[in-house]
Amino acid sequence: MDANDYHLEASLYYAKSASSRRKALVFRRFTRAAEAIRFAVEELTPKLLDGCTLEVNEAHYFGREIRPLYDDNVFPLRRRLSERKPRPPGPAGNA
């Protein structure tokens, strides 16, 4: 995806629930592709993200193709801070 594409209108399709037998699709339109990408990565579960589709300017990005767009250096929006907890220090004297 080109850096300018992040500012184009985008559509996102994803399942309402990963657990239901009947997969009802949700369609959301975003004014900017960057907002759709951020929503997909930060708000959807990994299982739902794997099954979603992003459409930007007639190009389609499926599931695992979306996360690299979020991680790209040209991604224009602020990313959510990592929710990882810091590791506790190891025992003293062990290197």
Image: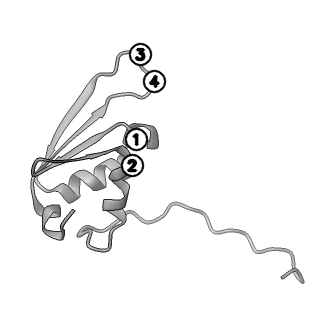
Residue under label 4, please give it.
19
Which numbered circle lies on residue 21?
Answer: 3
On the image, numbered disc 2 is attached to which residue? 64
Give the mark, 4 or 2, whose residue is nearer the N terminus: 4
- In the picture as drawn, the residue positioned furthest to the front comes out as 59
Rounded to the nearest whole Å, what is the CA distance between mark 4 and mark 2?
19 Å
Q: Residues within 10 Å of mark 4 (few under 14, many from 20)?
A: few
Q: Residue at x 24, y 31 (%)?
A: 26
Residue carrying label 1: 50
Q: Position of residue 53 (x, y in %)?
A: 26, 41
Mark found first going from the N terminus, 1 or 2? 1
Closer-to-camera residue (2/17): 2
Q: Residues within 10 Å of mark 2 (few under 14, many from 20)?
A: some
Instruction: Tell whether 70 sits left or right of 5.
Output: right
Sequence-wise first label, 3 or 1: 3
Q: Nearer the viewer, mark 1 or mark 4?
A: 1
Residue at 21% across, 56% down? 35
Q: Are marks 4 and 3 in contact (CB under 8 Å)?
A: no
Q: Quadrant of the N terminus?
A: bottom left
